[in-house]
């Protein structure tokens, strides 16, 4: 079938527009295999913010931190929803780290599924996950979403608080990169409509 000049121009224009609508954003792949995902998609906090501004409701931005953690370290209303990957258990102790034990949230995958269904989003929707620093929870929280059959899952590699500056005079403070250190909007005020409530306590 021979296309007319108008049809060819329209097709080229549509392809160009689709390309322009996909932001050329990509952080380097982490060298640590534990921080890598099958999708191989990574963003810095600044790139995640830019992607959200460009694509709006066509991308789902998830804060995977524990709500209690968010309460003390800060929150950005740019995220669409908080669905924690791990939850602190006040009844159990992590002797190795001298902190309360963090356990997998059994509602995590279903929580993300509900968030997508509530917004009418499909498997082709880009999903971004952000934890504290992009380390121990970033890639695992992304890989845990494999059962949903998502086509694109991005990990925010520097997380909300960023990396620690070890030679700081007051000790190792998280002052390197991350959402809080990139001049992006955040505060200590939480949005009740976006924060996760445990099914047995909500």
Image (tube, rainbow, N blue to C red):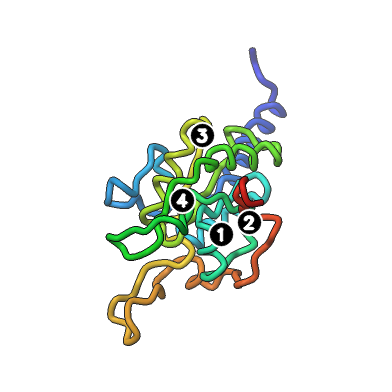
Residue closer to the observer: 129 or 197:
197
Dots 2, 1 in contact, CB < 8 A:
yes
The tag on residue 86 is 4
Q: How far is the residue under mark 4 from the one under mark 1?
A: 10 Å
Is the residue 29 above or below the residue 167 in the image?
above
Q: How far is the residue under mark 3 from the one under mark 2?
A: 25 Å
Residue depth check, mark 3 versus mark 2: number of the one nearer the observer: 2
Residue 201 pos. (x, y %): 63, 51
Q: How far is the residue under mark 2 from the one under mark 1?
A: 7 Å
Q: Count neighbours of disc 4 (C-alpha within 10 A) and say few if under 14, some if 14 to 19, many if 20 or more.
A: some
* SS at mark 4 in the image: strand
Is the residue 99 above or below the residue 7 in the image?
below
Q: Disc 3 marks which residue?
A: 151
Which residue is rendered at x = 51% and y = 34% of the image? 151
Looking at the image, tell me whether mark 2 or mark 1 is earlier in sequence order: 1
Residue 202 pos. (x, y %): 66, 51
The tag on residue 195 is 2
Q: Disc 1 marks which residue?
A: 67
Which residue is rendered at x = 59% and y = 42% of the image? 111
Q: Seen from this angle, which residue lies furthest front?
A: 91
Q: Is residue 137 left or right of residue 70?
A: left
């Amino acid at each position: 079938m021979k296309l007319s000049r108008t049809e060819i121009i329209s097709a080229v224009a549509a392809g160009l527009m689709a390309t322009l609508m996909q932001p050329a954003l990509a952080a380097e792949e982490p060298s640590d295999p534990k921080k890598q995902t099958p999708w191989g998609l990574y963003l810095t906090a600044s790139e995640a913010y830019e992607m959200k501004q460009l694509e709006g409701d066509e991308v789902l931005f998830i804060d995977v931190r524990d709500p209690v953690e968010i309460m003390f370290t800060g929150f950005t209303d740019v995220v669409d929803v908080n669905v924690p990957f791990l939850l602190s258990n006040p009844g159990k102790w992590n002797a190795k780290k001298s902190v309360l034990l963090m356990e997998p949230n059994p509602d995590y995958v279903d929580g993300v599924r509900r968030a997508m269904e509530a917004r009418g989003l499909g498997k082709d929707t880009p999903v971004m996950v952000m934890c504290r620093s992009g380390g121990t929870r970033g890639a695992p929280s992304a890989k845990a979403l494999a059962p949903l059959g998502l086509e694109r899952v991005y990990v925010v590699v520097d997380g909300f608080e960023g990396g620690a500056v070890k030679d700081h005079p007051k000790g190792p403070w998280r002052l390197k990169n991350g959402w809080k250190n990139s001049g992006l909007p955040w505060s200590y005020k939480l949005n009740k409509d976006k924060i996760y409530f445990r099914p047995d306590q909500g």
